[in-house]
Amino acid sequence: MSKYIYNMCGIAGIISPQTNMVGQPILKSMITTLAHRGPDGEGIWINKKSNCGLAHRRLAIIDLSDDAAQPMHYMNRYSIVFNGEIYNYPEIKKDLQKAGYSFNTASDTEVILAAYDCYRERCLQYFDGMFSFALWDEKQQTLFIARDRFGEKPIYYHLGKNTFYFASEMKALWAAGVPKDLDQKMLLNYLSLGNVQNPSNKAQTFYLQINSLPPAHYAMLQLQDMRLQVQPYWDIDKQHTQKLHDDAILHKLELLLRTSIGRRLRSDVPVGSSLSGGLDSSTIIWFVKTILQNSRSASDFCTFSACFPGFERDEKEYIQEASQLVGFTNYTVHPKPLELIQTFEKLLYHQEEPFPSSSIFAQYKVYELAAQKGVKVLLDGQGADEILAGYHRYLHWYLQEMAAGYKFSMVKREKYLLKQNKAMLTWGYKNFIAAMLPSHAALALERREYRRIVNNPDITNDLMRCVKGREWDGIHKPIITKLNDILYFNSMQMGMEELLRYADRNSMAHGVEVRLPFLNADLVKFIFSLPSHQKINNGYGKWILRSLMDTRLPASIVWRKDKVGFEPPQKEWMASATFTEYLVESKRKLINEKILKPSVINKKAVPLDAYESNNCDWRYICASHLF
């Protein structure tokens, strides 16, 4: 049996020079709210000076012994609470041992402690993983907190006058007495635009006195002056482009994917995978099959899906094709509209901030099914669309890049191929102008968003008062001169992190750990270094991945022209009498809170599909649960 020890957990803590602020009862209160993240154990530690308190809830994935329990201590100096996994920690550990470090456990947690002592904040550059952790240095009287490159694992904090609180979820901060004051600007942006993040300020949340440590950032808190310094430690170079032969590209892509998936299979408990019937999840299980071939683990591996019988976008056919190819057992759940309503408050409790559609509920049910089948670890294909240009909306950015480079014959050819592939794309003279004047296009899009906010007919004057002048915090459109610009924006500034938040909360709600092979840093850097035509070509997005998997997966999956992925029949659900009644109740609550005008109650419901943009009714239901 291997000695890999991973812990998906909930963490919390308090730092304060006022020793009366750091106590067992308040830490207990905070960590109890995170019990769902770690049902297998609890630990609370306060240092002798009573100026640092750390708390931890443990989800033991591999080793149930006390050796890897947290808070963990090292060299009589460092103490840590850690949520996540460092997939390559055995390799890092070997290097540290050569440098003279010794270890008392087989855990990745202890490797973080040793790596920090050896490299200080540069240790983050060595980690291939998903993580958020807080590390206390007793000698320096400092707290070092860090978050993984893409934001797979969360960490929130509140810095008061003389006290610093942090936790995996905001509910732990509320339990410590941090006020639950809604940010009016974030609420207005969400109701008018559907935005759940501010791309100009990644630390901003829906609550005024709570910040999120941004992905690929660390922070250092000095107890002496209670000053918090937040710094980035990693970024993608979207400008660098390398020229490689097609065969070399496919060879390296396969090597990087195989390495990433292999590391994320390190486990002593049954591992499974989400399976939507699309290219990303099908690719993962194909590689899993080749990596685990003839091993005992292969017989335990299974997949989990959500299907919607009778729905035109149901993916059952593709799911069955992929399952039959690899021979893994597939378990399927069939989410129902009444279940959604019954589960809605629980969903919002775990998510804490709004979400855009009922697809989050479908994901929640898939993770629940995995937990019911005793599978604690799931691989998932999230991230592939953002780095490989998988969404249809990326197609027109690709055409604009070619138009800006005066490659008009290529624009004409790609438009023809897109039409042949039945891609939903409108591309005309406005896009041509945007290609030639990208900064003007970005400004025009920002003005359009601003008008959508200030002209929203449903919003009360009370809420609209937070709009002051024409400058509006929360609206940012990037200047796009090439495909990599929009891929970078969606991967690092706005888009991917919110998807990762949904997955983290949904999985942790059921004590399930989700691992994302496409978000290996070396893999992402490699894909960003490739020219655009390796991502979009012949009318298809994800060109290099399709090319790699051609002949390995069924052509019906590799060359699919539609994009779905656990999409429920939301329009049908929202048209039901039960859902309409639920919407009316939500509107009444927002009217009472002076968010919506009373006239909204008479507006007829407009049911929309899960991925349609102007889904106001769905937003009203979500927003009504924020108070």
Image (cartoon, rainbow, N blue to C red):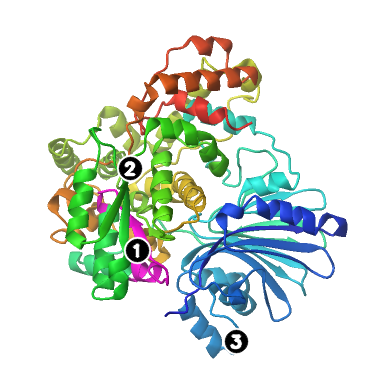
- Residue 200 appearing in the image: no
Q: Is residue 57 above or below residue 438?
A: below
| Amino acid on which disc 1 is placed | Phe
Left or right: 134 as drawn, with respect to 508: right
On the question of residue 507 being in view, the answer is yes
Residue 88: which quarter of the image?
A: bottom left
Write the residue at 79% across / 53% down: 163
Q: Is residue 228 above or below residue 474?
A: below
> Rounded to the nearest whole Å, what is the CA distance between mark 3 and mark 2?
46 Å
Disc 2 marks which residue?
A: 566
Tell me the crowding category of disc 2: few under 14, some 14 to 19, or many 20 or more residues within 10 angstroms, Cα based.
Answer: many
Three-letter amino acid code of the residue under disc 2: Phe
Range drawn in magenta: 259-279
In this view, the residue in front, 111 or 124, is: 111
The picture places residue 408, in percent across and down from the top left corner, at: 19, 40
Task: Write down the residue under mark 3.
Answer: 101
Q: Nearer the viewer, mark 3 or mark 2?
A: 2
The alpha-carbon separation of the residues under discs 3 and 1 comes to 32 Å
Q: Which residue is mark 1?
A: 526
> For the residues carrying marks 1 and 2, which lies nearer the camera in this image?
2
